[in-house]
Image (tube, rainbow, N blue to C red):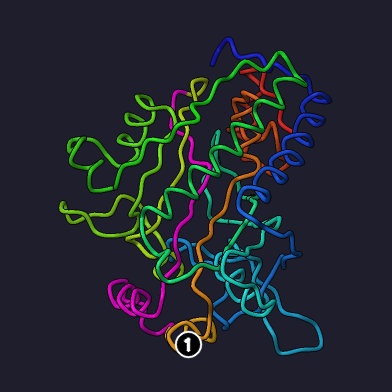
């Protein structure tokens, strides 16, 4: 990283970010039959609509003047989207996408993490016989194809961009990954496998492995832990696997019931979102989030996520970036 120099200046970077977002939205919506909708920045507390992430992250909250309501700034729209599909009357095979802007106050700050999170959140209504890994993997291939097509357009507009991404996806379950690298940590396994294969999808995130641990945490009330996963790319510049998307086939009543018990989260059963799910009042869906800044960072060969988004950074980060010639927005 000592010899790092951005391939685009700050103004070219802004232009390229705009291009990536326009092209990828078109590619994604076309590939998955998605319609754009507006989404909330915050949701009402006590409804079960906010994403609990790993269960310890604190939402940014505030009281609303003139009411007795408390609002929570979203962590993600994983649950809100499913309710929206129900309210809008979407049919099987139809889906939505939206810009999601979140504040994650407890997030670490480093090259790829920020307290500001921007994603394309998407969700599709599916049939019950679509609830299988084969269907999930087909959606993953479509998303990765949209990313590769976006890169092709970007390189035509900015020839100085030279990154190559592998269009073909290599699939592996979290248990198979542990079996392959039993002496490595989960993050080290991701790096090793992504370095070897380029573009990977690790499925079954959240379930307990034979070792007794989990590959990574996942809230029990949106993804089915047997039918979900993460899309990762090998980032040659940083020498790491870069997660671009967390996604999955969503829980049905049976898997929600099971996962709430495993997670010790039975108190959630009485919340509006959870009771609707347990009573089969919400459609079966698949969905996920795709990091906007992460995608721009990868395609533009940037060393720090702060080069493609405007956020707040601690003094150590500011100093290290200044010393390395990394210009934060």
Relative side of 134 to 22, left or right: left
Q: Secondary structure at mark 1?
A: helix
Give the answer, above or below, for where 229 lies relative to 37.
Answer: above
- Residue 60's quadrant in the figure? bottom right
x and y percentages locating residue 236 in the rendered image: 49, 21
- Residue 259's quadrant in the figure? bottom left
x and y percentages locating residue 86 in the rendered image: 62, 78
x and y percentages locating residue 131 in the rendered image: 40, 65
Q: Residue at x 54, y 56 (%)?
A: 288
Q: Residues within 10 Å of mark 1 (few under 14, many from 20)?
A: some
Magenta region, residue range: 239-268
Q: Residue at x 28, y 73 (%)?
A: 262
Relative side of 71 to 215, left or right: right
**Outermost top residue:** 3
Which residue position is annotated with label 1? 275
How many marks the image carries: the answer is 1
Q: Residue at x 35, y 62 (%)?
A: 225
x and y percentages locating residue 109 in the rendered image: 55, 41
Give the answer, above or below, for where 14 lies relative to 260.
Answer: above
Viewer-closest of 71 and 147:
147
Give the answer, above or below, for where 99 lies relative to 321.
Answer: below
Viewer-closest of 98 and 186:
98
Q: Would you say residue 263 sits in the magenta stretch?
A: yes
Is the C terminus in the top left, top right, bottom left or bottom right quadrant? top right
């Amino acid at each position: 990283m000592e010899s790092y120099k951005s391939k685009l200046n700050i103004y070219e970077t802004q232009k390229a970010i705009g291009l990536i977002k326009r092209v990828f939205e078109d590619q994604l919506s076309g590939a998955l039959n998605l319609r754009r909708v507006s989404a909330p920045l915050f949701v009402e507390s006590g409804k079960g609509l906010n994403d609990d992430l790993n269960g310890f992250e604190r939402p940014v909250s505030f009281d609303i003047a003139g009411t007795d309501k408390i609002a929570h700034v979203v962590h993600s729209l994983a649950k809100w989207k499913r309710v929206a599909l129900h309210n809008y009357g979407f049919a099987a095979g139809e889906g939505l996408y939206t810009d999601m802007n979140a504040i994650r106050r407890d997030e670490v700050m480093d090259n790829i993490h920020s307290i500001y999170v921007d994603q394309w959140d998407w969700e599709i209504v599916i049939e019950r016989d679509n609830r299988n890994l084969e269907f999930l993997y087909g959606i993953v291939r479509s998303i990765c194809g949209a990313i590769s097509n976006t890169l092709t357009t970007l390189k035509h507009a900015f020839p100085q961009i030279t990154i190559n991404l592998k269009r073909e996806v290599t699939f592996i379950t979290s248990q198979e990954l542990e079996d392959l690298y039993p002496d490595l940590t989960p993050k080290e396994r991701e790096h090793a496998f992504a370095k070897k294969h380029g573009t990977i999808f690790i499925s079954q995130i959240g379930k307990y492995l034979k070792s007794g641990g989990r590959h990574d945490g996942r809230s029990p009330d949106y993804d089915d832990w047997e039918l979900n996963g993460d899309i990762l790319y090998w980032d040659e510049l940083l020498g790491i696997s870069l997660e671009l998307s967390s996604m999955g086939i969503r829980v049905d009543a049976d898997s929600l019931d099971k996962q709430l018990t495993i997670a010790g989260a039975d108190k959630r059963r009485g919340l509006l979102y959870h009771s609707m799910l347990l009573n089969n009042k919400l459609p079966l869906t698949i969905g996920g989030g795709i990091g906007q800044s992460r995608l721009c960072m990868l395609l533009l060969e940037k060393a720090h996520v702060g080069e493609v988004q405007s956020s707040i950074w601690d003094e150590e980060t500011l100093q290290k970036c200044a010393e390395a010639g990394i210009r934060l927005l």
